Image: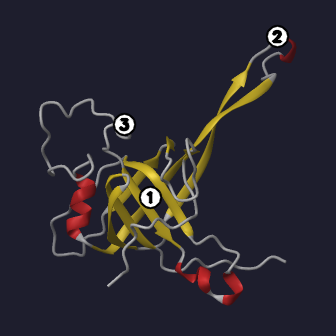
Amino acid sequence: MSKFYIPGPAPIFIGVGISPSITGYFLGYSESGVQVLLSPLTEDIAADYAGAMPADVAMLGEEARISFTLARYSEAILNILASFLNAKAIGSASANQLGSVYVQEGNSLQVWVESPYQVKTDLTDMIPGFFFPAVYVTDTIDQPLSIRVKKPNVSFRAIPTFAPSTPGGGLNTYILYTTVKPSWVPSIS
């Protein structure tokens, strides 16, 4: 039977550090939802007999893009994102940080976006949320100075990683995301 699914006001959490020593922070709530785009990465395989069409298509993985506009949030946690390199000093970088690798050097972040209404009786078949073990900020984080309420836009790109300690993963599991809530997620106070 088809029905309406309403995830609810999705809280956004950020994990900082290198696994297994991740510190979780509550970033805040979006203005009008969190957009999660899951996209396959493919490559056409050419062969003369297929002419201009591909003879087949190779699946080369997938990627995810996560974006939202913050309405109620922590400025201190937003500044962690604005450092662009896993909680390094905002607005500065040491001489050897240019060319840094996100996952290998521990510069990526982790994100958990929760579906709080999943616990409702009629919505228990809805996913509890999305956990992305390796993300980085892909767009400008606007920091307007004004008399109006700040509503920063945040965009991440999630990249797959081998994550033996990832919830829902196993030894040498290649993972982009899972729907299992990570243990570092703090309660909202």
Residue 154 image point, x, y percent: 36, 58
In the foreground, 137 or 96: 96
Residue 65 image point, x, y percent: 49, 51
Residue 63 image point, x, y percent: 55, 44
Q: Which residue is mark 3?
A: 104
Amino acid at dot 2: Asp
The answer to whether residue 35 is above or below residue 123 is above
* Residue 162 visible in the shown view: yes
Please give the label number shown on residue 48.
Answer: 2
What secondary structure is found at the residue carrying circle 2? helix
Q: Which residue is mark 1?
A: 67
Please give the label number shown on residue 99.
Answer: none
* Residue 142 visible in the shown view: no
Q: Residue furthest toward the bottom?
A: 121
Residue 144 image point, x, y percent: 20, 63
Q: Find the distance from the CA under tag 1 to the CA under tag 3.
A: 24 Å
In the foreground, 180 or 171: 171
Q: State the quadrant of the C terminus.
A: bottom left
In the foreground, 36 or 97: 97
What secondary structure is found at the residue carrying circle 1? strand
Q: Nearer the viewer, mark 1 or mark 3?
A: 3
Amino acid at dot 3: Gln
What secondary structure is found at the residue carrying circle 3? loop
Q: Upstream in the sequence, badge 1 or badge 3?
A: 1
Quadrant of res 52: top right
Q: Residue furthest toward the front?
A: 171
